[in-house]
Amino acid sequence: MNTQVIYNEDLHLEHKQWNMELNFWRDELKTFKNRLEELVQKWTEVEVLASLDHFQNQFLIHRTKIMEMKERIEMHELNMSRHYEANENVMDRFELKNHIALRERMETERQMYHELKKEFYAFLTKLM
């Protein structure tokens, strides 16, 4: 049976990439929030205000998910650093499963966030 060795450095690189992406999303959500605040001042139609409220709620949900993902990544990094300090540069199966689960959550969040952005931009286009 062939066993593939997964090194902590490889997983660390993926964590760094995820953190950069999450930071970008967090900053982007701030911009979207500012845009919502501008629109609330301009529009009084009930349907538009309801949509603005919907997007505000969705942005808050995604911001919470971003913070949760960052915390999970940080916890995984801490675990990896403990392995490294113990001269264990190879990930054990349990931690590898955790990493794969993180990867899947990140991919899901990426898709959901992308769909939300598309929906928001379509809404903005409709208002113009």
Image (spheres, grey):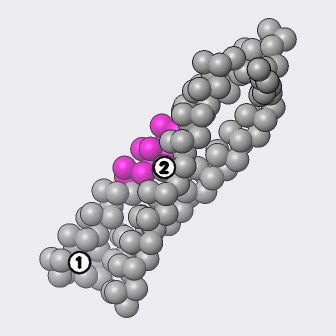
**Residue at the limit of the structure toward the right, as seen here:** 87
Q: Quadrant of residue 48?
A: bottom left
Q: Are marks 2 and 1 in contact (CB under 8 Å)?
A: no
**Residue at the limit of the structure toward the top, as seen here:** 86
Amino acid, disc 2? Thr
Query: For residue 127: magenta?
Result: no
Q: Residues within 10 Å of mark 1 (few under 14, many from 20)?
A: some
Q: Which residue is mark 2?
A: 108
Residue at 70 percent of width and 47 percent of height: 17
Amino acid, disc 1? Val
Instruction: Please name the predominant secondary structure of the magenta segment in the image.
Output: helix
In the picture, which quadrant includes the C terminus? bottom left
Residue at 68 percent of width and 39 percent of height: 15
Q: Tag on residue 75?
A: none
Answer with left or right where residue 76 lies relative to residue 42.
right
Residue range of the region highlighted in magenta in the rendering:
60-69
- Looking at marks 2 and 1 on the same chain, the residue that comes earlier in the sequence is marked by 1
